[in-house]
Amino acid sequence: MNDHCTVKIHEFENDIPCLIYHIEGDCRLGKAFYYNSFLENITGYRAKEVMGNPDFWSSIIHPEDRERVLAINSFAKQHHATFRADYRILKKSSDVCWIMDEAKPNEDGNLVGYAVDITLKKRMDESMRYDATMYQSMIEDQTECVCRFFGNSRISFVNKAFEKLFGIPRQQLIDSYFVQLIHEECRDSFWRLISEMSPHNTKSEIELLMGTKSSGHIWIEWTVRALLNNNSKIEEFQLVGRDIHDHKIAELDRKFVLEQMSAIYDANPYCMGVMKKMPDGKVIFVSANHATANFFGKPAKEFVGKSLEEVGMIFENIHDIIRPSLRDNELLRGKDNLGVLIPKVFWALILGKKYYFSSTVTIFKNKVTGDEYICFVWHDISKTVELETMIKTTGKELPDGETWITEND
């Protein structure tokens, strides 16, 4: 190669942001006869300061790494192999610099190599390792269950809380399948949720009935996250769960009771309904049962949002029914937002016809919103009243234990 070509190559090498060097012989720690200008960036030394010094490179290797580098160099020299190592050097300023160093023998028997400053990468790796260690410690100390698994539900990690709750040793849980811990009735819901998750939908929640050795079947609420890899593909799923068994059982019990009460509510032959006091003083229907709907000859859904007058009911003493409040009603003092008013008889005009009713009214309050509601049970006693009025008018006495009911009662 002529001198002109050599000069051009060296000019090109000086523009490369890494150290280029040529070593005499096959020992990486031997005497260099060429360094490009990047030597000063990595070591702080200029090429003219160190050129020809056979001990220069070995002298700047960090003492804690020197033995390892010497061993790698000896192996490469013995086997005529590529020298490759990551290690620390001490710069002229005494600062520590991590480098990735690689050298190969050429046809002349000398070594040609390059070295790259990887200090920033090492710091980032160390920071990531620290963060990973801290994260792992935090996960282990969590009181909530934590589990990670692959797309087929094969478990890759569980924390202590998970191991304790399920009563299964961690070594048995790893590589087992999460779906096997789920009650059969919930497995379809689980797979449906997993199939719906994507790189654009990485978080969801689900309540699952789980089987444990320590506590039998329990309800757990899981927060599910899809963990993405560098290619933005789902690599694993992470679940964080909390025991909601007592709450869930209470919720299911309430639901069952409400279903039964709803059936009783709709099947009751008495008129029943719930009304709400609005801020403007208006009282409107929230619901009405079938008996109420049949009495008025309207579907139950047509009552919702309407007042008594709007459904065709005009009361002679309606204010006596709806006026008592939670603050004023003596019966409510010392009780938990619930009171039963004394049953009473009243009459009302419904579509122009006079009816008598026996009623029981309960007033209760929503603790969150402060809204007051009125729950009523009405029974049409018009025929009874008419009969008693007729007997009273004729002067005949009623049997023992019976009472007169008049419009003024």
Image: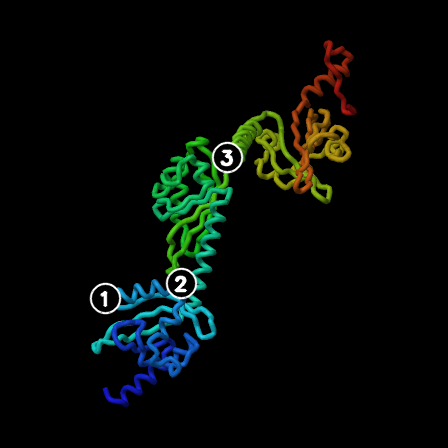
Q: From the image, which quarter does the N terminus lie in?
A: bottom left
Q: What residue would you read off at disc 3?
A: 245
Task: Answer yes or no: is residue 316 visible.
Answer: no
Q: What residue would you read off at disc 2?
A: 64
Residue 105, given in percent of the width and then of the height, sits at 24, 73
Nearer the observer: mark 2 or 3; the answer is 2
Mark 1, secondary structure of its residue: helix
In the image, what residue occupies the spot 33% across and 65% down? 69
Nearer the observer: mark 3 or 1; the answer is 1
> Does the residue at mark 3 contact the one at mark 1 (Cβ under 8 Å)?
no
Left or right of residue 178, residue 249 in this image: right
In terms of depth relative to the viewer, which is nearer, 385 or 125? 125
Q: Earlier in the sequence, mark 3 or mark 1?
A: 1
Residue 136, given in percent of the width and then of the height, sits at 46, 50
Query: What distance separates the C-alpha of mark 3 from that of mark 1?
Result: 67 Å
Mark 2, secondary structure of its residue: helix
- Outermost residue on the left side: it is 107
Amino acid tagged 3? His
In the image, what residue occupies the spot 73% across and 13% down? 402
Give the answer, above or below, for where 148 lies relative to 54: above
In terms of depth relative to the viewer, which is nearer, 315 or 68? 68
Q: What residue would you read off at disc 1?
A: 78
Give the answer, above or below, for where 132 lies relative to 254: below
Give the answer, above or below, for where 233 lies relative to 43: above
Amino acid tagged 1? Gln
Name the quadrant containing residue 33. Answer: bottom left
Residue 283, given in percent of the width and then of the height, sits at 69, 39
Q: Earlier in the sequence, mark 2 or mark 3?
A: 2
Query: What distance separates the C-alpha of mark 1 from that of mark 2?
Result: 23 Å
